[in-house]
Amino acid sequence: MSLPTTVLGTNGPTVGIQGLGCMGMSEFYGPTDAAEALATLDSALELGVTLFDTADVYGSGANEELIGPFVRANRDQVVLATKFGIERRADDISYRGFNNDPAYVRTAVDASLRRLGVDVIDVYYMHRRDPAVPLADSVGAMAELVRAGKVRHLGLSEVTGDELREAYAVHPIAALQSEWSIFSRDVERTAVPAAAELGVAFVPYSPLGRGFLTGAFTAAEELSKDDYRRHHPQFSGPNAARNAALVAPIQKIAAGRGVSAAQVALAWVQQRAEVHGLTVVPIPGTRKRTRLAENTAAATLRLTTEELAELEPIAAQVAGNRYADMTFTSAGRE
Ligand SMILES: NC(=O)c1ccc[n+]([C@@H]2O[C@H](COP(=O)([O-])OP(=O)(O)OC[C@H]3O[C@@H](n4cnc5c(N)ncnc54)[C@H](OP(=O)(O)O)[C@@H]3O)[C@@H](O)[C@H]2O)c1
């Protein structure tokens, strides 16, 4: 069965109601297998996934280069989303800087178009807000890219409700992409209500809690040495055991329904659409066809009111922040 579709924003593209996060195919979540990753992209399209999510920063350009041939081969069906705004340094693997300068926006888009090998990006996101640059200037530069035909629609990531309104006054925003899951619900304070009010679609990233909600791992030590999640506050030290216990209700519901914990986590976030009155298109990340099939099957799974109530108290009990440095998030500016 192909996924149901929805529209991103008031005049945005039509997409399957679940997208695919491609980040882990190049970096952050342990060893990658390019052949299986590419097969996963093909399989996604067959299942009705049309929104493919990457960023210039994933693998320092490698992720855009990896998915480029797939995008070009299926250009009419793929809704291509990429992002600018986080800078890295070749000499310091842990360095992350924000850059929203209009001149940088113009350079970054050309670099992404070149790596992807396409002449237009469907959804171009500002990956992180740099408070040093007036938002109107950055979004103004993004709007120029729409007028120049390099970008079709605009998106923002990790902005507050007020920032979303300010940006929207400069140019319509099709999608807001921020972390939203059973564990991470700070976006419900201001970003979600603003998106609902403006008709902006919400694209929850890390809807599986970076894999933790699936039960695939229960502590940082189980991950490979180069896995970025080893430094995640929620998966390290005493927080890991406390948070692993919070996954139990998800697993209990999954067992009762004969589905996986991942599917319950995805159904929960998909059902936020009705709870908050907005379009929701989660982008779970996977590099494997088997998991993709499992995840897309969850797009039409419906949790009962009782099941939703069991999951409701979890977020408030999570130990540790969702980033080691919360200036990386909208919550850090609320
Ligand atoms: N805007 C932003 O700042 C931002 C930040 C982070 C991520 N993102 C985007 O959001 C996408 C998704 O987020 P994410 O990848 O961080 O986290 P996620 O979707 O919550 O979880 C991905 C992890 O879960 C595993 N997984 C996937 N399906 C599974 C299943 N059915 N059962 C067990 N494990 C499963 C994946 O492993 P396998 O790959 O081995 O299946 C991977 O390790 C990213 O790919 C990226 O495009 C955006």
Image: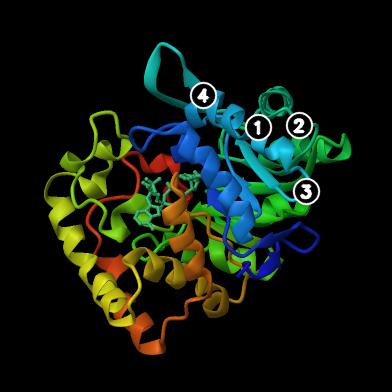
Q: Is residue 143 left or right of residue 319?
A: right
What residue is drawn where x is 49% and y is 39%?
Answer: 37
Disc 2, SS: loop
Position of residue 157 relative to residue 60, above or below, is below
What residue is drawn where x is 26% and y is 53%?
Answer: 216
**Would you identify the image quadrant in which residue 251 lies?**
bottom left
Disc 1, SS: helix
Query: In the rendered image, which residue does mark 3 sit on?
Result: 170
Q: Is residue 4 left or right of residue 219?
A: right
Can residue 118 be seen in this snapshot? yes
Ligand 1 closer than 8 Å to label 1 CB:
no
Task: Pinpoint residue 330: horizontal percent, then vertical percent.
Answer: 48, 49
Mark seen at residue 118: 2
Could you say which is closer to the camera, residue 272 or residue 77? Answer: 77
Disc 3, SS: helix
Task: Pinpoint residue 65: horizontal percent, then vertical percent.
Answer: 60, 27
Mark seen at residue 68: 1
Question: In the rendered structure, are the residues bearing label 1 and label 2 in contact, judged by CB atoms less than 8 Å apart?
Answer: yes
